Image: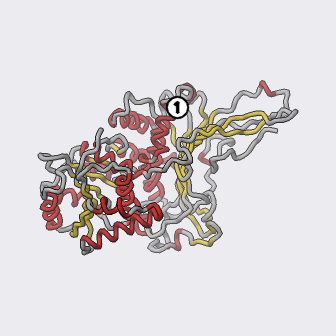
Amino acid sequence: MDAQACSYVIFGATGNLSRIKLMPAFYHLEVAGQLPEGTKIVGMGRRDWTQEKWLSEVKGMIQAKIKDAFDETIFQKFAARLHYHFGDLQKNECYSSLASTLEQPQFPKNSAFYLSISPSDFGSVMEHLSNNQLFDEQHGWKRVVIEKPFGYDLDSAEALQKRISHYLTEEQIYRIDHYLGKGTVQNVLVFRFANVMLEPLWNRNYIDHIQITHSESFGIEERGAYYDGSGAMRDMLQSHLMQLLTLVTMEPPVSMEADALRDEKVKVLKSIRPISKEAVHAHAYRAQYAPGTVNGEKVNGYLQEANIPADSITETYASMKLYVDNWRWRGVPMYLRTGKRMKKSQSVISICFRHPPLQFFRDTDIHCMNPNWVQLGIQPEECIRIEMTVKEPGLEMKTRTSSLDASFRNSDEKAIDAYEDLLLDVLKGDRSLFLRFDEVEYAWKIVDPILQTWASERDYVATYPAGSWGPEDSRLFDKESQKWRTSLTPECNNAK
């Protein structure tokens, strides 16, 4: 697919996401020569800025992100694409004047609307856009990019979908999950389906369990009001980590076409064993961070953060155990967890293989051997590592774990931000890395019983010290030998 020129309208262009991610990503696409000729970027904001002020602000956003790599010549070319549109999203005149702007000959007739705004505003913004014929595809395509969260639970997600379906077809909706734009995440598919040696092992006969961890050393920062109404389960598990699980466990799609890929992901979500309300405590755990020490500095607990009620039970750590009841994975536990104010910030998929039979070593000093692991580092370290048991040099029969590195980026190759890939995919009309509604729907069905049970239990929530690896939730594990993996390097050698 080739990218086509369009008018890229950013709602919330003066906000944090635009400042940290979107504008730097657009600039990098300019540097790479990937923005089609004629493409315009229209920033929508409630701040009464002039065009000069807008250009100055965007320049500052990019310089803060890339520092010494900033190129004034390229920025001047990029600046020619930028246009600022002042308006109040709640007033129709904002949209009528936007329609008049986009009718000018210098603006391409294709339009993409990026809603970097509160989910509560999605419906009304789309209604205004529709009423002003801004979704009319008579002279060019119209696409809408929606940031998560898509709903607060299953009922609200279905209500939101019903409302926006009045104005848009499913093909026009791009539900963005920036995790799916990460190079390592996409490489999971290549790693699995382009290497025939792995496929025979990728099933319940050889894999003991799978872990997916997203930990953050920072807290809720300035997002207290939002986060207290969301929590870790909604913020990360229901969306990002569930998506990673589908990529690791799905069957090979018939092609890399968007719907073929998403069909297989939905099959995984449909196959996940429902969690009854009676079984929630055996399958899920929640906790809040308490005061502690992170990177040598004392930090507040969650209840001491700004805009957090003193009696809040919102979880900053959530973990759960799932089973995919299909032919490939039946009986293999899938452990997912996420937490804030943990010891280290990292995202890792860890696949643990079964122990080998030890009869061969029964007359040696080897009594226990580490299982093989495949480690997929998502961030900050992007890598693929396969852990093998090898003999140590020397006269005695001793073993150690050695790691085979199959990382996909060489040291001299530049990392690409997920948003660069996804913003470009919108121009191409490639929806393979965006969520279809049935993916969102089935993910909510999985976590809804957990959220409902937690909401009814308001008297107690466990805590863990900030700067630790989280609370003691070992009751989730099926076996004593299973525990959370916290490192991308071999953690220990049990053989002697």
Residue drawn at x 27%, y 49% as measured from the top left: 36
Q: Position of residue 141 (x, y in %)?
A: 19, 46
- Looking at the picture, tell me which residue is in the foreground, 63 or 193: 63
Q: Answer left or right for 11 relative to 128.
A: right
Q: Position of residue 302 (x, y in %)?
A: 53, 68
Residue 238, visible in the rendered structure: no
Q: Secondary structure at mark 1?
A: loop
- Looking at the picture, tell me which residue is in the foreground, 402 or 168: 402
Residue drawn at x 70%, y 47% as measured from the top left: 491
Residue 27, visible in the rendered structure: yes
Q: Position of residue 236 (x, y in %)?
A: 46, 53
Determine the image quadrant of residue 54: bottom left
Mark 1, other Cα within 10 Å: few <14 / some 14–19 / many ≥20: some
The quarter of the picture where the C terminus appears is top right
Q: Amino acid at mark 1?
A: Arg
450 vs 324: above or below = below
Furthest toward the front, the residue is 73
The quarter of the picture where the N terminus appears is top left
Residue drawn at x 76%, y 39% as measured from the top left: 400
Q: Kindly identify which residue carries mark 1.
A: 330
333 vs 113: above or below = above
Q: Answer left or right for 181 relative to 130.
A: right
283 vs 128: above or below = above
Determine the image quadrant of residue 201: top right
